[in-house]
Image: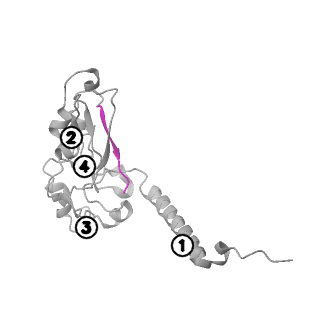
Amino acid sequence: MARPPPNKFITGEDGSRREFFGETLGQIARGIAEHAEKRVVPVKYTRPPGAIDEISFLATCTRCDACIDVCPVDAIVRVPRSGGLAVGTPILRLEIQPCIACADIPCAQACQPLALVTPPELWKGYRLARLVLDPDRCITFDGTECGVCVTVCPIGEEAIVLDDGGHPVLKAEGCVGCGECVKVCVTKPSSLKLIREDR
């Protein structure tokens, strides 16, 4: 009886076996890292600009407050005592005090331990959070003129504009998720919402 042809995947021809094990081990390692992060940091925080991944951040941040001290609008606060391993580390509470997207990102520049690292292109392509618009809340979709969200945006037309009908149009590629527009929105609750970005 003739033997079936060898299975390339099982025998490793063309490197497929090595690729399979490499990919599988990579998935296992990512799963372990995600599981460890959930156990170590059960609460997801929005970190100041330039924050490295959460586990490394907790190991690197010395709780020196240098980033807090240089923030011109006091947007950076400490995690309270109830924060477990994250206690004393810097976070943003964008719904309370938005980040104003300082051009030179002084908080990252002030971080000597390098838990915050100034992004290579500063704000270009960097996001603190993802912004979404609820058109059912936004008064411009009922015919009322507004546009305060556009007026306060520190990034400008690269992040948000009004279309010909006077409705806000979000530009994900330019928006940094600073929270300024969320805070000033005239609807309560705000027509704009920030969703935390995972690093």
For residue 14, what is the image quadrant?
bottom right
Side (left or right) of 36 relative to 103: right
Q: Which residues are magenta?
A: 191-199
Question: What residue did someone put label 3 on?
Answer: 114
Q: Residue furthest right?
A: 1
The reply to whether the magenta stretch includes residue 93 is no
In space, the residues marked 3 and 2 are separated at their CA atoms by: 27 Å
| Mark toward the start of the polypeptide (4 vs 3) | 3
| Mark toward the start of the polypeptide (3 vs 2) | 3
Determine the residue positioned at 71% across, 76% down: 6
Mark seen at residue 180: 2
In space, the residues marked 4 and 3 are separated at their CA atoms by: 25 Å
| Mark toward the start of the polypeptide (4 vs 1) | 1
Of the residues tagged 3 and 1, which is closer to the observer?
A: 1
Q: What color scheme is it?
A: one colour
Question: What residue did someone put label 4 on?
Answer: 174
